[in-house]
Amino acid sequence: MEHQQAKAIADRLLSELGPSCERIKIAGSVRRGKADVGDIEIVAVPKTAEQRDLFGASVAAGSEIDGAVQQLVLAGARLLKNGPRYKQIALPEGINLDLFLVLPPAQFGVIMAIRTGPAEFSKWLVTARKDGGALPSNCQVRDGAVWRDGASVPMPEETDLFNFLGLAWSEPGQRQAGWPKGSVRAASVPATAMEVALTNARRGGMAGRL
């Protein structure tokens, strides 16, 4: 689907789903401005709706977005996947909506960066530096959050993730795997002891071959 048409559909979905969300944004190839869009990706923090039993006691906190998704189905969409964190919906216009829901411990900034892509950039973000990625080797990405020393790092914005990694900000349509010019990773996140050891080992191996 052409970008202009996909963007118009995505904007309409924001208005339809928005009232049931604390926060909602377009991600994926639509956000990157790709000319040909394969699917529409949206990241949202759903509002919670308290549920009560017959006696009025609180029994659970559901998600208001389920009602909004049901309205899409009533309007002709088909619900293909209906997980608590990911919903895939085939829209009548002939394109799928991939809806990513940010639930604890996930962080909005991490999910937005990963789901904006492109795929090779997202993979690089979550790969350890010792394996050629951007992530400090004493950290890991799990359940939509960056974890360090057993605790998740608060990252409500994409800039929080970029700053943590020592990455210079890049616009969605310009993102690619690898350290861009202007990045200051050493100043933001010092190399771990393991990374230093690996670097020294590589240098030692190179010196032995000279």
Image (cartoon, rainbow, N blue to C red):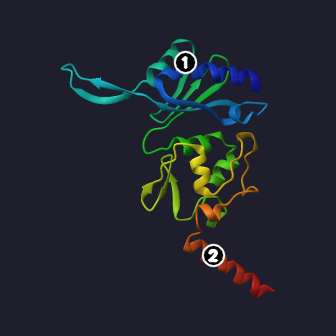
> Label 1 amino acid?
Glu
Answer yes or no: is residue 1 visible. Answer: no
> Residue 16 has which mark?
1
On screen, residue 57 versus residue 76, left or right, reads left
Query: In the rendered image of this protein, does residue 83 appear above or below residue 176?
Result: above
Residue at image point 50% right, 44% down: 107
Residue 198 tag number: 2
Residue extending furthest toward the front: 187
Residue at the far right in the pictured view: 210
Given residues 210 and 47, the one toward you in this image is 47
Q: Residues within 10 Å of mark 1 (few under 14, many from 20)?
A: some
Evaluate whether residue 120 shows in this view.
yes
Earlier along the polypeptide chain: callout 2 or callout 1?
Answer: 1
Residue 86, compared with residue 163, is above or below; it is: above
81 over 55 or under it: above or below:
below
Crowding at dot 2, Cα within 10 Å, few <14 / some 14-19 / many 20+, comes out as: few
Q: Are marks 2 and 1 in contact (CB under 8 Å)?
A: no
Query: On the rendered image, what quadrant is the N terminus found in?
Result: top right
Q: Could you say where residue 44 lies in the image, as x and y percent from the top left?
A: 52, 32
Quarter that holds the C terminus: bottom right
Q: Position of residue 143 (x, y in %)?
A: 48, 47
Which quadrant of the structure image shows residue 32?
top right
Q: Give the spatial CA distance, label 2 vs label 1.
A: 51 Å
Question: Please, what is the three-letter code of the amino acid marked with disc 2?
Answer: Leu
Element type where label 2 sits in the image: helix
